[in-house]
Image (cartoon, rainbow, N blue to C red):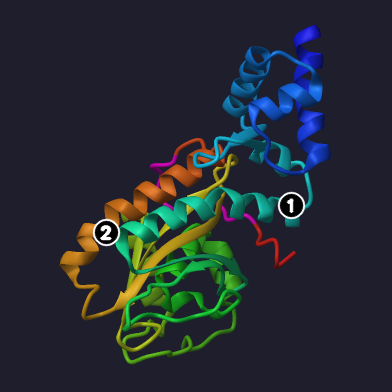
Amino acid sequence: MKSLGKALAVMDLLVSKNEEMSVTEISKALEMPKGTVHRILASLVRYKYARQDQETKKYGLGIRFYMMQSPLDRFKALRAVMTPLMRELYLKCKETVSAASLVEDEIEYIERFESEMLLRVSIRVGTRFPAHCTATGKVLLASLSDDELTQLYRGRGRLKKCTETSITSMRELKKALEKAREQGFARDSEETLIGVNCMASPIYNLKGEVVAAISISGPRERMTPEKVAELMPLLQETTSKISQELGAPDTNAAPCAKPAHSAKAE
């Protein structure tokens, strides 16, 4: 019981401070030996009640703690986990890296690292696009059941056409979503914006729900089939790491789990 009390004391401190702390800082605040603090934190990290920033090596609250909180808190936790890993991906690929969530039949960008190249994709956080014509949207829609998909697009005739290559029928969309489920990723070739190609991969939470998707996008002149093949493993490695941080049960699964609601949608 003494060990449990010490662990709860560490959790209480992290909650009250509401900021990341080092082992030394926690040790001093609680007058607890560093070795004890380190062992407690290792256990909390293992069970996702705490997490360690790989750059600063400091500790903060983990995703399991935030899952018990409000949708907005869970959204903040998601961003805290994915932002540093998105930055790493951006530094490796040099193209625009984005994260988006599903809001009804649209995607909404929730985080972005924009390429510094002269020719680049420039879109603000908060921008929305029809989900059916984006790589990110296909990944997110692929997590819906047939009934959920039908309900979402009930009463639609032709789907909105963003460019000449956009998907415009439910038959085409279902075919694209089946492909996304099989591959575990999705692509769009100038289906949203003329001259822009994109690829996306899903992020899962500890319940196995698709909570967001990460994409790499760029001008068609650079995002050739060869370049896409080169960058896809980096993208999937990133989404796998983020999913692992969120406690996902199987980060290699295709995007077929039910999506969690967007914090902004709630």
Classify residue 178 as left or right of residue 70: left
The alpha-carbon separation of the residues under discs 2 and 1 comes to 32 Å
* Dot 2 alpha-carbon crowd within 10 angstroms: few under 14, some 14 to 19, many 20 or more: some
Nearest to the observer: residue 249 or residue 46: 46
Which residue is drawn at the image coordinates 74% and 57% (left, top)? 72
Q: Find the magenta span and give its range.
A: 251-260
**Residue linked to disc 1:** 73
Decide if residue 257 is in sight here: no
Q: Can you say which quadrant of the picture contains the N terminus?
A: top right
Mark 1 lies on a secondary structure that is helix
Which residue is drawn at the image coordinates 50% and 51% (left, top)? 84
Q: Say whether residue 246 is magenta.
A: no
Decide if residue 81 is in sight here: yes
> What is the three-letter code of the residue carrying label 1?
Asp
Nearest to the observer: residue 79 or residue 21: 21
Q: Examine the rendered structure and indicate whether residue 46 appears above or below residue 89.
A: above
Q: Quadrant of residue 223?
A: bottom left
> What is the three-letter code of the residue carrying label 2?
Leu
Q: Examine the rendered structure and indicate whether residue 43 appears above or below residue 57.
A: above
**Residue linked to disc 2:** 231
Q: Examine the rendered structure and indicate whether residue 154 appears above or below residue 36.
A: below
Mark 2 lies on a secondary structure that is helix
Nearest to the observer: residue 199 or residue 111: 111
Q: Quadrant of residue 192?
A: bottom left
Q: Sequence-wise, which precedes: disc 2 or disc 1?
A: 1
Q: Say whether residue 255 is magenta.
A: yes
Give x and y (percent) for residue 149.
54, 67
Which residue is drawn at the image coordinates 21% and 58% (left, top)? 230
Give x and y (percent) for residue 65.
72, 38
